[in-house]
Amino acid sequence: MGYGLMSMHGDSAFTSQSTHETLREACARLRLDAAGADLIRFGQNAIYRLRGQPYVVRIARTVETADVNIEVRVAKWLADAGFPATALADIDHLDQPIEVGGRVVTVWEYVPQGPQRPTVSDLGRILRCLHQLTPPADLELPAFRPLRNIPRRLALAPSSVKKADIEFLRQRAEELDEAYAGLSFELPPGPIHGDAHPGNLMRTETGGIVIGDLECFATGPREWDIALPAAYRYGLGWLTDDEYRTFVEVYGYDVSQAPCFPVLRSIREVNMTAWLMQNVAESADIGNEFRRRMADLRNPDAPRRWRPF
């Protein structure tokens, strides 16, 4: 697959300010109150928690509906299966997703959270259960493509990003796409979350774990879902040996020892860097971190002292 730059529109103006206007328009249409809404995450989506109402509003970065439609269908499947995942808001006459001002919007039930944050062990446990599910016959999940977001992100890179950085990421993505196509996997393929990490988990007030951010669901190698904790340990140092060992014990497989892991780790690093690139205009800290990551990607042997965002 080539990663040449394409002409795209939509998320070039995706900022915390512009998405707040989309939020107000969406809430006015749905007869919800946007006053005082809190921006709780800004990345691939802008996610707002409404005050005084048990809802979370997600505004997609792109104007394409394919990912959001998959997310909606997956949410309905998991709800029917009794699996602990974020649930679509039960609002009369609301057929999701909706389009507001050229953006795709969904509304979700808010999950009241307990004081303890989810752990990597929680991630291993919920992924083990998720990977045992069989989707219904009428839910056709897309084939997993680990670098599918790279062309869009490069095409819509902020103007402050150097052309040399964009070209480096394009070339590196092409190399890794070819390497991924040649990988062999030990675990059987099946439904995967696609973006599984502790930040996409919520611990409820009663101690249960709920998984969210379902738009990357696909059919693919289970190794992809469990490679990120291994990258956190052996690439970024974000996990201790004990934490990663516990994750492996809970899930039942150590992907860090698999031949596919070096390629999966490198793909994760490129994706994490291109994801951060989208938001370099939001703060000086993000800009500095992006430049640090780019320097490290150019030096595969450099220690990754990356900050999580």
Image: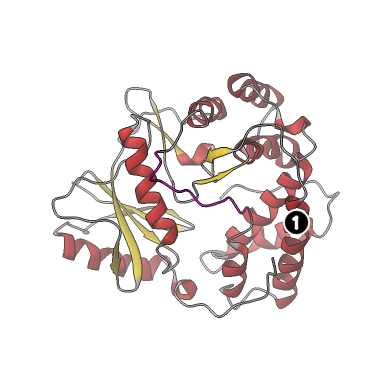
Q: Would you say residue 139 sits in the magenta stretch? A: yes
Q: Is residue 294 left or right of residue 134?
A: right
Q: Is residue 49 left or right of residue 302?
A: left
Q: Residue at x 28, y 42 (%)?
A: 110
Q: Nearer the viewer, residue 232 or 215?
A: 215
Which residue is identified by label 1?
Answer: 176
Q: Residue furthest bottom?
A: 7
Residue 80, image x, y percentages: 31, 34
Pointer 1 local density, CA inside 10 Å: few below 14, some 14–19, many at least 20: some
Which residue type does callout 1 highlight? Leu
Q: Nearer the viewer, residue 171 or 306?
A: 171
Q: Nearer the viewer, residue 214 or 56?
A: 214
Q: Which residues are magenta?
A: 136-146
Q: Residue at x 84, y 56 (%)?
A: 299
- State the quadrant of the N terminus: bottom right
Q: Residue at x 66, y 27 (%)?
A: 244
Q: Would you say residue 212 sits in the magenta stretch? A: no
Q: Secondary structure at mark 1?
A: helix
